[in-house]
Amino acid sequence: MKTIYTSDLKAGDEFINELFLLQDVTRRTTKDGRPYLLCTLRDNAGQAGAVFWNVPEYIEQWTTAGTAVLISGRVVNYKDTIQVNITDMNPGQKADLEELLPASLRSRDEMIGELRNYIASVAEPWRTLLTNILLDDAFLPRYANAPAARAMHHAYISGLLEHTLSMTKIADLLAGHYPYVNRDLLIAGVLLHDVGKTHEYEVEGGFAISEDGRLVGHIVRAIVMVEQAASTINFPPDKLQHLVHLIASHHGTQEWGSPTVPKTLEAILLHQIDLLDSRIQGFLDYVRGDGSDKAWTSKSSPMFNTELRRPDGMSE
């Protein structure tokens, strides 16, 4: 049973056989030829950098990212950041992922119910397409568990579903606010734009990027999934083309990974909603995880390239 979490670590702490998830393992050699490991230790409270000097060969052979490990070590300050100097490492037994990985604070069942309601709110043929993809018995658990990212925003179990539902709520509001918006198309685009992330990240591997994620990517994978599902129900080609455009363009620019830029009203809305929700949640996630007891974060946010001030009402 864990007794120490990454959020509790402070310089001078020492611990023995504490369970963590190993990530971002890099093998290096000192100038005089001695091997060492750089890695990240993760649990459901956050993550911490770690180094294992003079790592024994028998340990180096079995250490891979995504494995549960029992760590002994001492916490130090390194370049104004907490770092664990590992003194021993042993294989850990397979543990509950939600003990080692952060998870959404929202109820998964509640979110799935919300997803079903949004799907029921659109007309045919959108409803059948969404049902066949998202509510498939084999796919839904995977979709409901997936993170939205490895870092930056919604980087936790069920983060993808939380992010998607937050976006859908905003999309529903904006569809009623602006004229000429095709609500069914926009809602379908929001619900499906990131389904490829179920193939891009390996939850069992601590959100490591999969082979499919590296070679194909979530945008192309989502398009393939949608086109395959559409082909089984004789989905109208013109509607499918517009939906594919929303998925293909949702990153906004080719520099950000989209093969095309948004060219329709719904595509522009989807991109802006995605950007807004990811940035706001990225702000909240960073401020909560900073660990500072001050009004301002102790370090600059990688997303915003500046220190951030906690909102009034957020506990310091």
Image: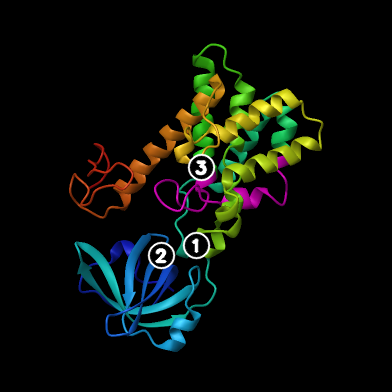
Q: Which residue is disc 1 drawn over? A: 206
Is residue 7 toward the left or the right of residue 171 in the image?
left
Q: Which residue is disc 3 drawn over? A: 162
Mark 2 → mark 3, Cα distance in angstroms: 21 Å
Kindly check if marks 1 and 2 are in contact, taking CB atoms under 8 A apart as contact: yes
**Residue 256 placed where, x, y %?**
45, 40
Q: Earlier in the sequence, mark 3 or mark 1?
A: 3
Name the residue at 72% across, 23% down.
238
SS for callout 2:
strand
Q: Main secondary structure of the magenta part?
A: loop
Name the residue at 58% across, 30% down.
246
> Looking at the picture, does residue 149 appear above or below residue 126?
below
Name the residue at 63% across, 46% down.
221
Q: Which residue is disc 2 drawn over? A: 42
The reply to whether residue 121 is in sight is no
Numbered mark located on residue 308 in the image:
none
Is residue 243 toward the left or the right of residue 31 in the image?
right
Q: What amino acid does circle 2 point to? A: Arg
> Looking at the picture, does residue 224 appear above or below residue 76?
above
SS for callout 3:
helix
Kindly check if marks 3 and 1 are in contact, taking CB atoms under 8 A apart as contact: no
Q: What amino acid does circle 1 point to? A: Gly
> In the image shown, does 134 or 255 lie closer to the viewer?
255
* Scheme by which the image is coloured: rainbow
Q: Quadrant of the rendered structure where residue 306 is?
A: top left
